Image (cartoon, grey):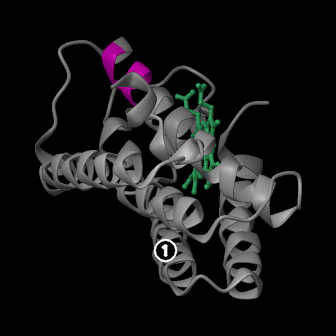
Amino acid sequence: MLQALSGPLSYPSTSQERQMKKTILSTLAATTLVVAASAQAVSFKKPEDAVKYRQSTFSVMATHFGDIGAMVKGDKPFDAKVAAANADIVATLSALPWAAFGPGTEGGKAKPAIWKEMDKVKAGADEFQKAAAALKTAAASGNLDNIKKAFAATQKTCKSCHDSYKDK
Ligand code: HEC
């Protein structure tokens, strides 16, 4: 079960296993969609919980994004299905961290400027979400050149926000 859950990061070996991973992945996708739709309604008991939530979502997102990066750079053999599953997860998670930057949640590696320039941060988050959606489309096409371009474009949006708003 645990092994099956690691689907997008590992290689399916038998067709039965592949089918199982597919089922689990689509269940996961359905679950995360519900979370995404209610992201605005998310609330936190303590500011530390908001920090933990946004760091966790960034961390999981970065893991799946990095797996696509490894294929794009040729550090790992290209597998179109795995890339598509990862891009799907990145696109879904791209909607989540922003609700956890509410008033009074300063902390973590987030620069205090965020809370003074929330409109710019939101604009950066929108750019990123658009890029992640385009990466998902590119990955669904299975064309490595398209994925490379969309990956680079997405990575630019991560870096541009981190340069301004994240401590190293
Ligand atoms: C609009 C701004 C913005 C965008 C876009 C963005 N990030 Fe971040 N990211 C942040 C901020 C702010 C933090 C610090 C959060 C904190 O510590 O509270 C962060 C933290 C992180 C962390 C550290 C999480 C941890 O465990 O401390 C990782 C990894 C990360 N981002 C990866 C990415 C990747 C990969 C992308 C693009 C695919 C991305 N981010 C896009 C603003 C952004």
Looking at the image, residue 89 sits to the left or right of residue 71; the answer is left
Q: Which residue is drawn at 32% across and 33% down?
A: 103
- Quarter holding the N terminus is top left
- Specify the amino acid type for callout 1: Lys
Q: Is residue 137 above or below residue 43?
A: below
Q: Nearer the viewer, residue 146 or 102?
A: 146
Closest to the observer, 60 or 28: 28
Q: Position of residue 56 (x, y in %)?
A: 46, 28
Residue located beneath label 1 in the image: 136
Residue 160, image x, y percentages: 73, 60
Q: What secondary structure prevails in the magenta region? A: helix
Label 1 Cα neighbours within 10 Å, binned few <14 / some 14-19 / many ≥20: many
**Residue stretch rendered in magenta on the structure:** 49-53
Locate residue 72 relative to residue 45 in the image: left or right: right
Furthest-right residue in view?
74
Could you say where residue 153 lies in the image, as x and y percent from the top left? 71, 76
Tell me if residue 120 can be seen.
no
| Residue 88 falls within the magenta-colored stretch | no
Relative depth, front residue between 115 and 54: 54
Q: Is mark 1 on a helix, strand or loop?
A: helix
- 50 inside magenta stretch: yes
Q: Is residue 50 left or right of residue 127?
A: left
Measured along the vertical axis of the image, is residue 130 above or below residue 166?
Answer: below
Q: Write down which quadrant ligand 1 falls in.
A: top right
In which quadrant of the rendered view does residue 138 lie?
bottom right
Say how many tags the image has: 1
**110 or 56: nearer the viewer:** 56
Residue at 42% across, 19% down: 52
Q: Looking at the rendering, which quadrant does residue 88 occupy?
A: bottom left
